[in-house]
Amino acid sequence: MNSEASVDLEAVDCPQGCRRDDEFVLTGGDRLHRLAGEFAVSRCRTCGLMRTEPRPSLEAMRRYYPDEYGPHQAVHVGHSPSTTDRPRWRRALGSLMWRVADSKAESLPRMMPGRLLEIGCGSGSFLNRMALEGWDVEGIEVSERAAARARALGHRVHVGNLADIVIPDKRFDVVVGWMVLEHLHDPVAALHRMRSWIRPGGWLVLSVPDAGALGFKLLRGAWYDLDLPRHLYHFDRRTLRDLLEKGGWRARRFVTQRSILSLVASAGYVLDDLGLAPGVARRLKNAPERPSRLPLLLFPAAFALSLVGQTGRVVVWAQSRD
């Protein structure tokens, strides 16, 4: 791991407003890109929320999202929303297979298409898919390069930090954020801001790594979804519910995602730690970001683990408390 550069770190209190009384959990570094720094994870003894602390400042964090960061990369998009020449049966089959194999799709509320905002839309693959399903879509993305790719697909994308984005006179039926909340420096303020963009009765749908699952408890620093230092908060279902309440939301339902690619990548980290099979380890670690048929092949195992809440990723559906 590269340790040549210093990192501008900042101390941070628990976002729940608890008095400072933390217990040490572990330390680790950037295993994904092998960039500089060692980071501690602490648990608040009052509310139980784990956080990376001290953490890189907002400005210092930019270095940990290099151009090769997976969600910012170009992705394969089979069709644009304007495609009209596919037979209806192919469109229906494609939609069914997407909802089976894509952990984002199967996590969405079943509802008629409306207006959808994606926080952290990356290069636009999910926006594009939802547009094909008939939704009026819009995105927010901090990476200019990723946003340009999404815009090239014909989608409206606002570029910048969530706190600085202005979306005038617009209300959405659904606001989604896939693996976003744990990256935010001020998640409570972000949740309040999301409320300003939702129509009465609308849904907030967020996915986060589930630090309450066995994956983290057994793998610890080799857990792929620990992702230090990009992941600033490490939720279980209780602490996620509590944070949503503080941000003005009420959790209505929790769903375990049917995806185990992060567990596959964790196996690569374990092999790294043991010094075994470097070629196999490299392929396993790349599994979450490499387009393939692996989600379909792993679906039976992912489905079984989702039934007992142990895939390591959880989705919450929430509505405003107003």
Image (spheres, grey):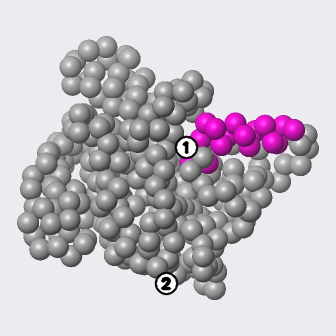
- Pick the residue in front: 276 or 181: 181
- For mark 2, what is the residue? 322
The residue to which callout 1 is attached is: 103
Q: CA distance from mark 1 to mark 2?
A: 29 Å
Q: Amino acid at mark 1?
A: Ser
Specify which label sits upstream in the sequence, 1 or 2.
Answer: 1
In the rendered image, residue 318, in percent from the top left (x then y), is placed at 49, 67
Q: Residue at x 60, y 67 (%)?
A: 174
Quick one: quadrant of the N terminus? Answer: top left
Residue 253 percent location from the top left of the image: 48, 59
In the image, the segment drawn in magenta is 89-105
- In which quadrant of the rendered view does residue 12 lie? bottom left
The image shows residue 291, relative to residue 213, as above or below, that is above
Q: Is residue 92 magenta?
A: yes
Residue found at x 32% / y 17%: 278
Q: Nearer the viewer, residue 57 or 12?
A: 12
Q: Is 224 placed left or right of 95 in the picture? A: left
Element type where label 2 sits in the image: loop
> Residue 73 vs residue 133: left or right?
left
Q: Which element is circle 1 on?
A: loop
On whether residue 56 falls in the magenta region, the answer is no
Viewer-closest of 36 and 278: 278
Q: Residue furthest front?
A: 308
Residue at (48%, 64%) from the top-left corner? Answer: 252
Amino acid type of the residue that numbered disc 2 sits on in the rendered structure: Asp
- Disc 2 residue crowd, few under 14, some 14–19, many 20+, Cα 10 Å: few
